[in-house]
Amino acid sequence: MNNRMVINYTPGPTLLHKLSGFTKVFLFLVMTVAIIATYDIRILVPLLILNIIEIVSMKPNYKPILIVFAITFVTVTLLGNVMLFLVSPDAGLNNVGGNHILWQGPGRLYISKEFLWYMFVVFIKRTTSFASVMAFALATTPSEFASGLNKCGLPYKVCTIVSLAYRTIPDIANDFVNIRNSMMMRGVEMSKKASVWKRLKNTVYLLVPLIFTAFGKVNDIANAMDLRGYGKHKKRTWFAENEPTKWDKIFRVLTIVLLIATVYYVVMYRFINPWPAKFWCPWLAREEVISVNAIDTIFFMDWFKK
């Protein structure tokens, strides 16, 4: 299963795999906060490199990662940028604060250096977030995730729900394949020979037994947990939570340093001495940044001004 899916269900052999659940969850949460806190390429690129190093060090199966990345790139990045260009070609001016036009299209459509920079920075930010999630998913088993969340203060009942949700993914995938094969043996065409519309229609029919099968398993798990007295005590121990090692302590110290740096950056460069625009740009000086009200640049707002 680990070879076909990004999520690991058994601990791996590398250093990151052997860290405790709390260390992994703590690092992931701080990394997520650091990525969300800025659009500065000077901060995002080091975080991206760090996450790529983490992924490479775990020697994963790259095929599912690349497939998910390709789907995300096409659906979010490419289509999103096309729609953004059609709706708001002034996104570079609004967020970067400059307007060096490279190509002037018909009407209000144009491409500027700042618009390309805006798309590039957003792509790096999304890629950094994706790499952070992949690194965490590759290094953490569902039980470690649940125990780490519980150590962070989340109630253990909620953590158990999270763990069970992760563990049902392979079961649902297997049930999907079994039901699909059963339907094909009964003459329902779901291969590439059928049209796309017919395959989509037959897939909808497949979802009904899949949903009922999933609910049946949920009921069985709930009954088994009730019979074993789950939820009787206010606290519980976790089989997957290990005692912190030397490397756990080192990673926790590094995570705290990253958290302090993130807080310092937000306070210093968002409140005390903020950059005039949302995005830092290497070819624009502070005094050259143009301050624009983003709402005024939306083309359909002109209808209300008439």
Image: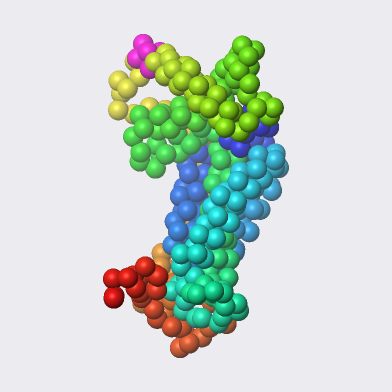
Is residue 204 visible in the rendered structure shown here?
yes
From the viewer's side, name the closer residue of 110 and 34.
110
Q: Is residue 303 left or right of residue 166?
A: left
User: What x and y, as percent, mark residue 62?
Assistant: 70, 42
Position of residue 131 relative to residue 240, above or below, is below
User: What x and y, as percent, mark residue 270?
Assistant: 39, 72
Q: In the image, what residue occupies the spot 39% across and 15% down?
A: 219
Q: In the image, what residue occupies the spot 68% across and 29% down?
A: 192
Position of residue 233 relative to residue 112, above or below, is above
Q: Is residue 285 left or right of residue 300?
A: right
Is residue 254 visible in the rendered structure shown here?
no
From the viewer's side, name the closer residue of 128 and 139.
128
Position of residue 78 relative to residue 305, above or below, is above
The answer to which quarter of the image holds residue 278 is bottom left
| Quadrant of the drawing holding the N terminus | top right
The answer to which quarter of the image holds residue 295 is bottom left
Indicate whether residue 17 is drawn in magenta.
no
Q: In the image, what residue occupies the spot 48% across and 36% down?
A: 145
Span shown in magenta:
222-227
User: What x and y, as percent, mark residue 102?
Assistant: 60, 79
